[in-house]
Amino acid sequence: MTRLAALALLLLAACSSTPQLTTSSGFSFASYDAVVIAKPATATDATLFGLDVDMANALGQYGLKVLGDRELEGLKDDARARTLVVRLALKGSGEVHVVTISFDSAASGRTEATITTEAEGNLFDAESRREAFEELRHAVLSRVARDKGLPYERD
């Protein structure tokens, strides 16, 4: 019965027009001071069209220091435990594309939060990508602000 209820909730969330941030138990952005925007895992994921830079700038405005890969390598354990690795993925075929943002613990590698949205439009059209990304950006930043006790106003 528990699996059926969980499946129903997942389906409901997938059908929602507003993307929802899914987090691990007890997760809060307030527990983190810094983020590292991960480089794409494969050559086919390399085309993020600047969305990685946009996300880094947005997170920086809400009290999360943006670090580079080399800085992450040199972090002590306590600082690493307060750092998230942010992975962005943009996939598409035809007129549908999917944008996903995942937040992983830099200390354990465990995925702490994730959010995905699907949008119609051409993957190579800047406006189509931007519309999908803005919905995710809003959901993430409103949660970061809430967790850190900061005001948030959608721009």
Image (spheres, rainbow, N blue to C red):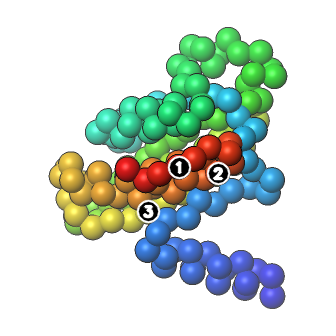
The amino acid at mark 3 is Thr
Q: Amino acid at mark 2?
A: Arg
Q: Are marks 2 and 1 in contact (CB under 8 Å)?
A: yes
Residue 29 seen in this snapshot: no
Residue wearing tag 1: 152
Residue position marked by numbered label 2 in the rendering: 146
Q: Name the residue located 64 percent from the left edge and 51 percent from the top edge.
A: 146
The answer to whether residue 5 is above or below residue 142 is below
Q: Is residue 134 visible?
A: yes
Q: Is residue 70 left or right of residue 80?
A: left
Mark 1–mark 3 contact, CB under 8 Å?
Answer: no
What residue would you read off at disc 3?
Answer: 117
> Where is residue 67 shown, x and y percent of the image?
56, 21
Q: Assign the N terminus to one quadrant of the image.
A: bottom right
Amino acid on which disc 1 is placed: Tyr
The mark nearer the N terminus, 2 or 1, is: 2
Q: Residues within 10 Å of mark 2 (few under 14, many from 20)?
A: some
Neighbour class for label 1 at 10 Å: few (<14), some, many (≥20)? some
Q: Which mark sits nearer the N-terminus, 2 or 3? A: 3
Q: Residues within 10 Å of mark 3 (few under 14, many from 20)?
A: some
Q: Secondary structure at mark 3?
A: strand
Residue visible at 63% across and 19% down in the picture: 72
Q: Position of residue 141 (x, y in %)?
A: 53, 48
Q: Is residue 49 above or below residue 98?
A: above
